[in-house]
Image (spheres, helix red, strand yellow):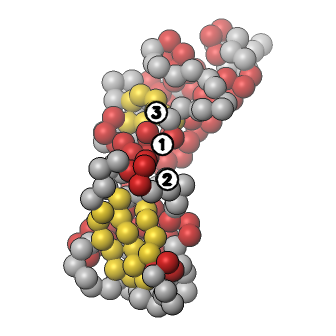
Amino acid sequence: MKKWNNELVDNLPSATRSAINCMWNNMHHRCLSKPQYADVEVCEEWLSFPEFAKWVITSSNWEYDKRNELCLSRLGDKGDYSSENCTFYTKQESAKEAHQNIYMVYYSAARNLDESREVFWGLSEIAELTGVSASTLSNYTDTDKYINSGRTQPFKLYKLKVENTNDRFNTTKTASTIKTV
């Protein structure tokens, strides 16, 4: 008996099946454990891994390439996970699609200008690390008021207006480097 009891899935090369399984698990993990996905659901059809794998292989633009792996993305980073609302982007395209806004964090206790600022792709990363809700962060954005989270140095938050984000900023910068107290 084959593992999935599904001819299409069972006959996939193991690296392809593993990559699709990882996407499927990550999609479910996001919906079940990440606060910013609290209102996002996985369609009933995709609760089954073989059905999700079938969609990936037969109905989408995904091709396995370990050098440039594509990410499952919801269109406009809105709505539920379903065949009608999902496509695949490169990791850079996905980040740009998900976070149309870029934010600059300025720390109050920095010793110099280079230490005083960091760039982030959207509020969700900052909210997760600081424990301050995205809505509160949004309310403080561009106000010149310090935000005190208890987990980080006090900081101010500004939305940047950038036309071509890939050319102007390092896209690998993440909130994991935010300065903690």
Please give left or right for residue 174 compared with residue 3 in the image.
left
Give the spatial CA distance, label 3 vs label 2. Answer: 15 Å
Q: Quarter of the image for the N terminus: give it.
A: top right
Q: What is the x, y in percent for residue 18?
A: 69, 29
Q: Nearer the viewer, mark 3 or mark 2?
A: 2
Task: Please report whichever mark, 1 or 2, sits nearer to the chain's N-terminal start.
Answer: 1
Question: Is label 1 in contact with label 2 (beta carbons under 8 Å)?
Answer: yes
Density class for disc 1 (Cα within 10 Å; few <14, some 14-19, many ≥20) is some
SS at mark 3 in the image = strand
* Amino acid type assigned to the residue bearing label 1 in the image: Gln
Please name the residue shown 52% across and 60% down the image.
173
Nearer the observer, 60 or 79: 60
Above or below 73: residue 4? above
* Amino acid type assigned to the residue bearing label 3 in the image: Tyr
Question: Is label 3 in contact with label 1 (beta carbons under 8 Å)?
Answer: yes
Residue with the most extreme top position: 7
Q: Nearer the viewer, mark 3 or mark 1?
A: 1
Q: What is the x, y in percent for residue 68?
A: 60, 32
Q: Which residue is mark 1?
A: 92
SS at mark 2 in the image = loop
Above or below 39: residue 68? above
Q: Which residue is mark 3?
A: 89
Q: Which residue is mark 2?
A: 171
Please give left or right for residue 43 compared with residue 138 in the image.
right
Q: Is residue 172 visible?
A: yes
Nearer the observer, 48 or 174: 174
SS at mark 1 in the image = helix
